[in-house]
Image: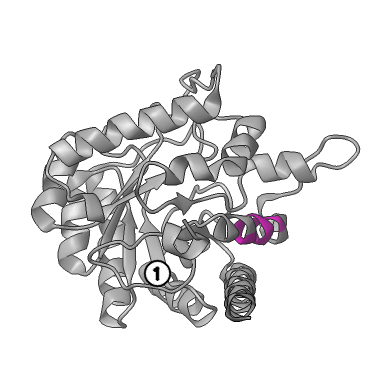
Amino acid sequence: MSKQSGRGRVAGLPQWDRCAVMGVVNVTPDSFSDGGRWFDTTSAVKHGLALVEEGADLVDVGGESTRPGATRVDEDEELRRVIPVVRGLAAEGVTISVDTMRASVAERALAAGAALVNDVSAGQADPAMIPVVAAAGAPFVVMHWRGFLQGGNVRGVYADVVSEVVDEIRARVDAVLAGGIAPDRIVVDPGLGFSKDAEHDLVLLAHLDRLHALGHPVLVAASRKRFLGRVLAGPEGEPPPARERDAATAAVSALAAHAGAWAVRVHEVRATADAVRVVQAIEEARGGAAGREGAR
């Protein structure tokens, strides 16, 4: 299977001829890399539009940090943060993903114009999530998740991280299908950084083909994460701040695109948008050269 055909298509979303770029808008005061920068509706909408200008194909709007140790916000506060931003971006024609673990937020966001639900718990945090998404006929991201990253609840022990993550995603996909979400509306995500250390994340990225074998488009969300900080750490072992990991993020985006990822989720869009377009050009050149060779 070629990289291009391996990306898959997601019913209910635009169809891109390359790896899509999902820009991140965190409407939070405490996200790990940009908390508080886009906390009010006006600045969040403006930032989302700027990401589209820089090359984002869709924008992921979230009102609750999922970093390790983050305190959950209550439902009313998450709704207050997210819905006006979704409504504002939808009014400008932006394709929107809503990043939430709450069915009520997903339902309201879809009604306000969101097109995709990106639930890091894959419906495990809120039993009402799958029925809500199924009823709306919306696409849904099934991410590998082993519970909230609070206190000691990390559960990052694996004998074979690739096999275990793939098996656990497969089981969750089966549950999502049983809940009524159509197979052509499912995206899978290895959950980099969630109950995983740097070595686990790198091994998963090296074996994205195993995720593709599940038969669903793959989303890779590596942007600014801890494993990149570990790779980039200086001689004293000190990782660079999250915002200094964007070049490394673009490198991972290029590798993920080359491996056939459907989309990459990033905070800084321009470098990754350039990277995936270069990958597309090289793939097209390879295809053209193969065609010319075959015609000889």
Give the residue furthest to the right: 235
In this view, the residue in front, 7 or 98, is 7
Q: Is residue 81 visible?
A: yes
- Height in image: 289 above or below 21? below
Q: Which residue is drawn at 28% across and 59% down?
A: 116
How many neighbours does mark 1 have within 10 angstroms: few (below 14), some (14-19), or many (20 or more)?
many
Q: Can residue 39 be seen in this view?
A: no
Q: Position of residue 264 (x, y in %)?
A: 50, 58
Q: Which residue is drawn at 15% across and 64% down?
A: 111
- As for residue 180 lying within the magenta part, the answer is no
Q: Where is residue 260 in the image (x, y as percent from the top left)?
A: 51, 57
In this view, the residue in front, 188 or 107, is 188
- Height in image: 68 above or below 81? above
Give the residue furthest to the left: 135
Q: Which amino acid does label 1 sit on?
A: Leu
> In the figure, residue 112 lies in which quadrant?
bottom left
- The residue wearing badge 1 is 58
Q: Secondary structure of the magenta portion, mostly?
A: helix
Q: Residue at x 44, y 46 (%)?
A: 212
The span picked out in magenta is: 248-254
